[in-house]
Structure formats: C-alpha cells, structure tokens
Amino acid sequence: MNEKRLSRELVGKLVVTKEGKRIGLIKDISFETRSGELIHIVVTSATPYATTLNIEKDKGGELLIPFSSIIAIGDFVVVGEEDMR
C-alpha cells in the first residue's frame, strides 16, 4: 500500500470484501487536512449486503470505510470486513 495513486483513480471503483462481497462504489476520500492522513473512503450506491453491516455513515447516509481496512487496489478495491467497524 506504499504505492502512490491519484485519488481520482480510485473514485468510481467498486469496493468488495476479501470474500468477494460487493459493498458499493468509491465516491470520495476523506483526509486530515493538517497531516494529510487518509481517514475514510466514502462509498455510495451501497449494496443490500453493505446495508446489513454496522458501518459508520456520514450525514448524507454514505458509508465511511476506514482507509486502513484497504487490503488491495486494482480493478476494484478490496477491504477487510473485520476492519470496517
């Protein structure tokens, strides 16, 4: 995960769990402005499966998945379900 990527490369990518269950699409990335630390990926178009999980949401109802839960980035973004809570 030390590889640099532009945030616009991530927006629109599908987010899946390492078990292959779909979560939704990346809408945005939130970060700490002072340090630049990446905090969350903001996920839109949540799947029915994702809505059953206890994932933090923003004021607009979008899912907030901790950036630290990302396992891999490729054609889609793989996250560890146990790390999303």
Image: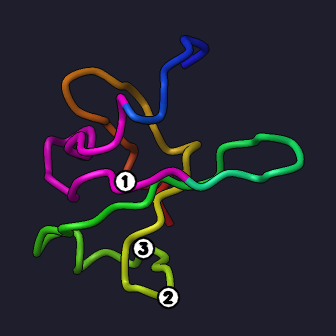
From the top left corner, tell me how far across and down residue 44 is, in percent: 27, 66
Amino acid type, callout 2: Lys
The boundaries of the magenta stretch are 9-29
Amino acid type, callout 1: Glu
Query: Pointers 3 and 2 in contact (CB under 8 A)?
Result: no
Q: Mark 1 or mark 2, which is nearer the start of the sequence?
A: 2
Question: Disc 2 vs disc 1: which is toward the camera?
Answer: 2
Q: Name the residue that disc number 1 marks.
A: 81
Q: Residue 44 versus residue 69: which sits nearer the camera?
A: 44
Query: Pointers 2 and 1 in contact (CB under 8 A)?
Result: no
Name the residue located 49 percent from the left edge and 80 percent from the top edge.
Answer: 58
Question: Disc 3 vs disc 2: which is toward the camera?
Answer: 2
Real-space CA distance between mark 1 and mark 3, rounded to the nearest whole angstrom: 10 Å
Amino acid type, callout 3: Ile
Q: Name the residue that disc number 3 marks.
A: 55
Query: Pointers 1 and 3 in contact (CB under 8 A)?
Result: no
From the top left corner, tell me how far across and down residue 25 is, in percent: 23, 53
Question: Disc 1 vs disc 3: which is toward the camera?
Answer: 3
Name the residue located 22 percent from the left edge and 32 percent from the top edge.
Answer: 76
Q: Name the residue that disc number 2 marks.
A: 59
Q: Mark 3 or mark 1, which is nearer the start of the sequence?
A: 3
